[in-house]
Image: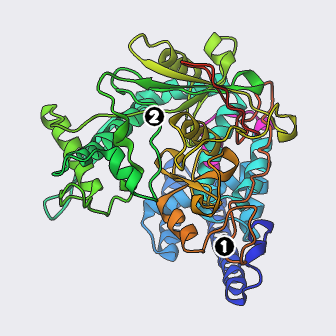
Amino acid sequence: MPEHLRALAGEPELSAAWEQQVAARRAEAATITALLDYRQRTATHYAQEPLVTRSEADRAAVRDAARILGTSDRTATTVLNTTQDAKRLLPRTWGAFCEGLINLPRVRKTVDAATTSSLPDHVLRQLDQAAAEQAQRRSLSEFHHWLTRYIASLDPEAYARACEKETQSRFVRFQHQSHGMSYLQAYIPTLEAAAIEKRLKAAARGLDQHTSSGDTATEHRQADPGAAEPGIAHGNPGQGSPTAAPKDASGAHSSTTDGPTSDPQTSDPRTTDPRTTDPRTGDPRTLAQREADLLTAWLRDGRVYDAAVDAKIMIMIPEATLTGDSDEPAMAADRSWMIPAHQARNLAADPEANHHWYQGHTRKDSRNAEYDLLSARYIGRYPPEHLRDALIFRDGTCQADGCTISAERCDIDHQTPWEHGGETTADNLWALCRRHHRMKSHGFLHPPDKQQPHNAGPKTEPEPEPEPPGPAPGHPARPDFIWSAPMPVRYDLAA
């Protein structure tokens, strides 16, 4: 078993499952290789025929492959074209697939990244090597986020051009289904989508405030031992959005935006499970249903009803990008998406936005940090808002291995429980989504420094990401932060 799964090797059932998975991947690779060979043999056979004949022969070969795969012709075309590109352009990725180390979805994501970015050959080779290694030890979602960051950092100027070109492909699509329901699909710029997402989720959670007893969300949160404190960065995404950022190659700036309708109590993380009805409001709708109803109302007639709107976007922007000395793109706090430099500068300069800025120094080696990780200690169980924001930037996502739930949607949990003497300090706090928080509370997930059984491994410390070519550095996993407004409080986080 690979190193990141070595803790599971002691269980015979899990070892057998891994061996079966490797065998299944090898079998899939062998099947696709045979189909590629068949397609190539067909092309060779009709190589001297007119173009129309060659095209129809290829379609016939793909149709035969689709019958073997049990898919449509369109799906078979996608699979064969993607794997042919991998075999031709990405030999290391293709080799890992044939050895059973990675699966087809990871191959497809790597090929998509390689073929849509117009990368020169030497950069493509570096991407191939890095992706083949990263795909083996990351979950599919983590790997997708890593590819997004890595491609953006390879050539920031090319990335900005690609983003600008892709905006021409934006669309809205309606698909009417049976049972009186339809899908609404939109392909729009990420920054706009993130603003809509934050506003929608915040408004849906804002409905939780209207309780029959008149209790505030703060009182309920304090009464709930599993609840985490809200962040401080709130704003109206229609006017501006919070930002955050690495300060030049060795540091990071961060900011958040406040809007006039903001209310910090609407970010209660206890409603992160969309399947759960909130018992405080008596509203029979789930969170997901409330979000759907609000979006429908907004699009149909522009009404927001009486829902409080409290939204924030947290982004990390290089200081050199802010000053115009670099075009390195900005990155979301959860490391899941990027935006080109000009969008980040426009966001930071928006006169209607109310930003909360952080400065963060990034260091590859934590031993070079000026102070211990957020060394300040706080009285009380719940971390203050500024500390919570710094932890969101530090962790990015839930710290359970393989989980990609944004830290903004997570509980801030004491690794050593508060009732057992655990302090409210950064080195004792980590972001856990509600699912993994419950697992930890019941003894099935353990913090990194605690003794644990083989089947409850903590989130492993990620290996350093490969450096992209050229002057643009890769993004470190954890920045150090200095909160710079409105009073001189400093938070230093070891990288």
Q: Is residue 449 magenta?
A: no
Left or right: 277 as drawn, with respect to 3: left
Left or right: 346 as drawn, with respect to 122: left
* Local secondary structure at mark 1: loop
Q: Disc 2 marks which residue?
A: 190
Q: Earlier in the sequence, mark 2 or mark 1?
A: 2
Task: Please identify the quadrant where the C terminus is shown.
Answer: top right
* Local secondary structure at mark 2: helix
Q: Quadrant of residue 446?
A: bottom right
Percent coordinates x, y for residue 39 in the rendering: 61, 63
- Residue 271 lies, with reference to residue 32, above or below; the image says above
Q: Quadrant of residue 399?
A: bottom right
Q: Which mark is residue 145?
A: none
Q: Residues within 10 Å of mark 1 (few under 14, many from 20)?
A: some
- Residue 22 lies, with reference to residue 215, above or below; the image says below
Left or right: 170 as drawn, with respect to 34: left
- Residue 69 lies, with reference to residue 359, above or below; the image says below
Q: Which mark is residue 456?
A: 1
Q: Magenta part mainly helix, strand or loop?
A: helix
Percent coordinates x, y for residue 422 in the rendering: 65, 57
The CA distance from mark 2 to mark 1 is 35 Å
Question: Which residues lie in the magenta part?
Answer: 109-123
Percent coordinates x, y for residue 346 in the rendering: 49, 15
Q: Quadrant of residue 392?
A: top right
Residue toward you, 228 or 463: 228
* Amino acid type shown at disc 1: Ala
* Amino acid type shown at disc 2: Thr
Q: In this orientation, does residue 82 appear? A: no
Q: Is mark 2 in CB contact (under 8 Å) with mark 1?
A: no
Q: Closer to the camera: disc 2 or disc 1?
A: 1
